[in-house]
Image (spheres, grey):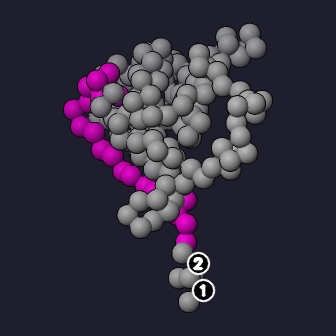
Amino acid sequence: MNALAQLGMVSELPRDIQNSAAHSVEEERKDYFIERDGERYAGNHLLIDFWDARNLDDPARIDETLREGAIAAGATILHSHFHHFTPNGGVSGVLVLAESHISIHTWPERNYAAVDVFMCGACDPNLSIPVMQRLFQAGRIEVDAVRRGRVQDRNASAA
């Protein structure tokens, strides 16, 4: 456990889902797919580009900000891991969520950050964007949204 903590791979909010006696059979079988606009799908996946951004070289601040964004979106943080590159100072990292993940790669020399936010269930990944923008102060933000794991209508596929 200490080796994982030194690598930053242990969450400050640990959860032991596999050994929790509090989970009933019904909770374990709960379907976290989303139903919206007549579609059923696994989750919302945002690809976010922060251009003309700042504060891209501090892993601790980025970790803290992504955690705040995950909480704002309604997600459950399991653990995180961040790496600081030299000589340019870029950061790559991931928050593993019960609902999926948030990952980031920064290029301070280009004032650019690429963020990937994928969440299932009742979470709203869009709520993480303003939180990240407070740190990055980007001049331009581009967002591509994808509905992942779309369920095909069985009646339509049989026709």
Badge 2 vs badge 1, beta-carbon distance below 8 Å: yes
Amino acid on which disc 2 is placed? Arg
Relative height, residue 41 to residue 48 (above, below): below
Q: How far is the residue under mark 2 from the one under mark 1? A: 6 Å
On the question of residue 122 being in view, the answer is yes
Is residue 151 rendered magenta in the image?
yes
Please tell me whether mark 1 sits on a helix, a strand or a loop: helix
Q: On the rendered image, what quadrant is the N terminus found in?
A: top right
Q: Residue at x 45, y 65 (%)?
A: 39
Q: Which residue is mark 2?
A: 154
Of residues 86 and 36, the one drawn nearer to the viewer in this rendering: 36
Q: Residue at x 70, y 31 (%)?
A: 22
Residue 76 lies in what quarter of the image? top right
Residue 20 lies in what quarter of the image? top right
The spot of residue 108 in percent (x, y) is: 37, 24
Amino acid on which disc 1 is placed? Ala
Residue 82 lies in what quarter of the image? top right
Please tell me whether mark 2 sits on a helix, a strand or a loop: helix
Q: Is residue 147 left or right of residue 20?
A: left
Of residues 6 and 10, the one drawn nearer to the viewer in this rendering: 10
Magenta-highlighted residues: 132-152
The spot of residue 58 in percent (x, y) is: 43, 15
Q: Which residue is mark 1?
A: 158
On the question of residue 107 being in view, the answer is no
